[in-house]
Amino acid sequence: MNAALQTFFETLINGLAVGSLYALVALGYTMVYGILKFINFAHSDIVVLGAWIAFVLARSLGYATPDAAAPWYAGLLILLVAMTACGAIGYAVERLAYKPLRGAPRLNVLITAIGVSLFLQNTGQLSFLFGASPQRMPSLLPDTPLLTVFGARVSLVDVVGAGTAVLLMVGLEYLIFHTKLGRAMRAVSYNTSVASLMGVNVNAVISFTFVVGSALAAAAGFLYSMKYVGIKQPADAGWVMLGLKAFVAAVVGGIGNIRGAMIGGVMIGLLEFFGAAYVSTQYRDVYVFALLILVLLFRPAGLFGRATVEKV
Amino acid sequence: MRMTNTRIFSALALLSLAACVGLGGCGPTDSNSGNASGGGGGGARSAAAGGSSAQAPESAGKGSEKSPAAAPAAAPAAAPAAAPAAADEILIGHYASMTGSEATFGQVTDKGIRLAVEKVNAAGGIKGKKVRVVTLDTEGKESVTTTVVTRLITSDKVVALLGEVASSRSIAGANVAQRFGIPMITPSSTNPEVTTKGDKIFRVCFLDPFQGYVMAKFARENLKLSKVATLYDQKQPYSTGLNDNFKEAFTKLGGTVVAEQAFSGGDADFSAQLATIRDRGAEAIFVPGYYTEVGNIAIQARKLGVTVPLLGGDGWESPKLAEIGGKAIDGSYYSNHYSPSDTREEVVKFVSEFQSKHGGEVPDSLAAMGYDAAMVLFDAMKRSPSLGGADLAKAIAATKDFKGVSGMISIDAERNARKSAVVLQMRKGKAEYVTTIAPQQ
């Protein structure tokens, strides 16, 4: 009985911790889709950059050995720098790759996104950047269990990870629904041309969306590498899978819907971990994509999306 | 119901497109990136240092750039343009994961091969000609492997192939090599299927059934364990094969496999599998995976309160294992082809030569296997009446009691090498020699 409870809580904690990171990544997919109506396939590579920039920073700050004690603010500093750097990269990607295609068919932008994704993956592998080998992320948080629930250790990394994710999501929620800039974002998402007629600077709003989405992705990458300290090299299939699952979370929650992406991310995380723990570990990716198929069959607009009439 | 179905379904279609692109369908782009890393990388430069002419990598790069355009247009007439080998050179091909998640495998093997090439050239070459190795990058992907092996054979015109570490990619390469009749020696692919691809495919390492037996015997007889769990990568034939072989041998020796859990290469979380293993009371966990995953598995196992040692195979061999796993991997055991702390004359010489060339880096077993594979090939080339595929294959097959760094190498009728294995233990981040286990009779 005790072992069963322990497994249950361990699964719950891991599912929530990873699910909240999926949610952070899903937000980037969904925000860009809401405004530009295209799926930014290069988004998962921003997650990778976030993790690796954090790694390089931690190394250069001298926390190279896994056991070197880092002060609490080191992690925060690294998080903020990684978010800023990735925000800047997101801005540059939008400016250089997507903006020239503003009036072009959506498919063109999409193919460009795949191109950007390949470019980032392969650039990241260059030996003077991150290299092609996996690395050990220095542990910036003491790896002590915070409390124990029925034998399941709630570690500081999980609490800080999920907590940071929730804080960022609350901040985003405030930004979008309670500020002028957020209103502009929502206006552009409803109708770009009308918004621009009302004096909204559409290009600035789009750039800002990319910056915010990329910064959140960087945070997710950093937190993910704090939890799974053996960080994979930039083009590893594991990163692609992380991005795909976050994308599924965005679709399940209703693509274009901010709250849907958050709930979708946590749902996907819990589904994956409970499926792995109680059904079979062999099919952990299958659960996620099976849910996607079910949602698309029965609620094509996503669980929280509103069905709209397509103008033909 | 004219809802946004079309939009969402197009999203689904794009998802699968992205999956193809991201998860290994990068075929069209690969010839370019392979070219960049194979021709312009550090590896090719060291070939120039060891080989006869400093322009060698340049001309190789140009030749292979030209060939894709020339070959389809006028295949019969384009032969001179597509043959970059100089008249006084013998070209051999090496396909390896120079990038990708098993990048250290390819890079280290390449260093071993290049040391062998340097030595054979310093001793006067083969049949009066210098040997040059062309290395192309498989990026750790099977789809790319087929492309680069075809390119090595058809446009670089290599006389023999060395490659891969991962069995899945050696199988892909073996299919191509056998079709073109070019002899291939895999330095360290241990899956039995590799050499079944045809009479031109050889290996200089031991096989998975033996490696599985070694760890089973070691766990049962040296560690005196009776309950063991396994955790394997269901996407890798290397891992699934080793898992089966271990299970069979361990059960035959009177032990029980209490849990058999799987993961997929690329997974980051193993908590569900490890929790099951913990609940079944296993005394050790056999993890026949590659070092990146093994490091992560060790860390997560200790976090979940699993303190039993991990057991593994030669896929663990990398300095990255200790770097990623840290303290968590200490105390675990794995089977391997050789140990650098061995005192045999061949080993001592190889280690010191390798270290003086690579700034003190201790050669791991993959470097030793790359070196041995190349040396066996050169030995066969010297004995062979010609460098044609059939003659050369016959000469490799006749290899007997060749004194390699990884032990005596004799090629048997199935084109495999029969050898003993060593068991190493991770202690304070270093792999220390524990024992040697001989082939079963």
Image: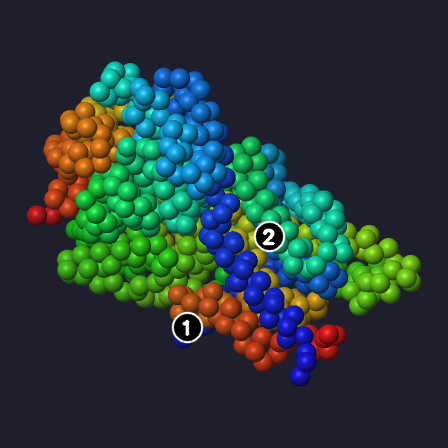
Whether residue B309 is visible here, answered yes or no, is no
Mark 1 and mark 2: Cα distance apart in space: 34 Å
Nearer-N-terminus badge (1/2): 2
Which residue in the protein does label 1 denote? Answer: A279
Counting from the top left corner in percent of width and height, residue A210 is at 72, 53
Q: Quadrant of residue A21?
A: bottom right
Amino acid tagged 1: Val
Q: Is residue A91 above or below residue A8?
A: above
Residue at 60% from the left image edge and 52% from the top image edge: A114
Residue at 29% from the left image edge and 60% from the top image edge: B229
Amino acid tagged 2: Ile
Which residue in the protein does label 2 denote? Answer: A114
Circle 2: element type: helix
Q: As drawn, which residue projects farthest toward the right? A: A198
Q: Is residue A215 above or below residue B354?
A: below
Q: Is residue A117 left or right of residue B213?
A: right
* 1 vs 2, front mark: 2
Q: Is residue A128 left or right of residue B358?
A: right
Q: Are marks 1 and 2 on the same chain?
A: yes
